[in-house]
Image (spheres, grey):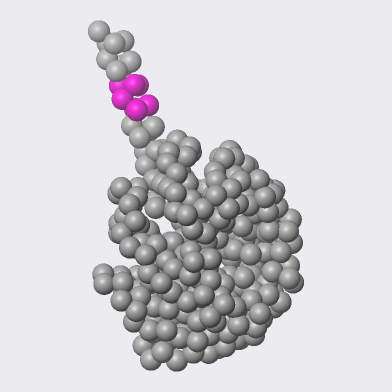
Amino acid sequence: MYKFFIVIVIVIVILALGTLFTMNSSPNKAFITNQGEDTVSIINLDTFQVEKRIKVGKKPLGITILKNKSIALVGNVESQDLSVIDLKKNVVIKTLALKATPLGLTHNKDETEIYVTDWFNSQIFVINSMNFEIIKKIPVGKTPSGIAFNEKHSFIVISNRDSNSVEIYTEKEMRLEKKIMVGKHPYGISTEGDYIYTANVYDDSITVINLTNWQTKEIKVGDHPYNVIKINDQLFVTNSLDDNISIIDTKTFTEILKIPTGETPENLWVDKKNNRLVISNWGSDSISIINLHDMKNIKEVKSGLQSRAFGDFILN
């Protein structure tokens, strides 16, 4: 009887430790769209290992992750559809035909709606994340590329490359709140708090838009900037033809540093768990990993042919 009791206690302890480990451990992975091989690479950001490649549609580019729903959506430009990936099983569970050219993807704060830019048809899709039905299509400027959601103001913001403009829509009504002219060929776009940031490919600049007064400011960066994100008090910009990123101080709006990357860096997102920046390099089929503590490039990982990862591609 005593031995039986000891065994039961040991089992309970093991189960408790296992539960604690599960609670304390969280996925820390990058999902990289590889346009040249029609796959998404899953990369463990703790071990720097490619765990799996998932076959998706033709020419995947954009991606957004709905963490609470454990799904990712990938925009496939050539097959004109979206692949829905189950993040628990790491398999495609659904393909949504759009008959469009999905480029940028994002979602609202509560993950009820997904927003997709349609490059060739100059419109955006609003999609219900529960049943994946299209709620509406909204005409926008020419060749919309980047799209992002501003949580503070509940705005959807869109960069229209060939219109050299940004359009700002309200979440509930999807009403056009404001259209603002920016630099030449804005591609990537991000937003936080009272600001919007665009990467202007043909101007070698970024535009900063103040949402409280609609004022803009242009900052020169490197050659052909593709995307920009804000981390703490700094902006990080990929300079695709310089093979580096620019770091901008948001207090002075001046460039303070450049960091080398792989070839043709395009998109970037933050690994919050490890306080690192992850950059997709289209030209070297890789991702670069920057330590945000000392701003050093600590690792380059081969990810797949023509890695793009346009969107929020990290799950942690």
- Residue found 39% across the figure and 51% down from its top: 67
**Residue 23 quadrant:** top left
Judge whether 149 appears above or below 102 on screen. below
- Residue found 29% across the figure and 18% down from its top: 8
Instruction: List x then y, in percent, for residue 28.
Output: 50, 48
Instruction: List x then y, in percent, for residue 220.
Output: 64, 85
Residue 103 visible within the image: yes
Viewed as shown, does residue 163 lie left or right of 138? right
In which quadrant of the rendered image does the N terminus lie? top left
Viewed as shown, does residue 52 lie left or right of 86? right
Instruction: Give the main secondary structure, helix, strand or loop, of the magenta stretch.
Output: helix
Q: Nearer the viewer, residue 203 or 96?
A: 96
Instruction: List x then y, in percent, for residue 145.
Output: 52, 68
Instruction: List x then y, in percent, for residue 83.
Output: 47, 46
- Residue found 50% across the figure and 87% down from its top: 181
Judge whether 88 appears above or below 264 on screen. above
Q: Nearer the viewer, residue 41 or 48?
A: 41
Q: Is residue 13 magenta?
A: yes
Residue 246 visible within the image: no
Region rendered in magenta: 9-15
Q: Is residue 244 magenta?
A: no
- Residue found 48% across the figure and 64% down from its top: 118
Q: How many marks can you see?
A: 0
Judge whether 19 appears above or below 183 on screen. above
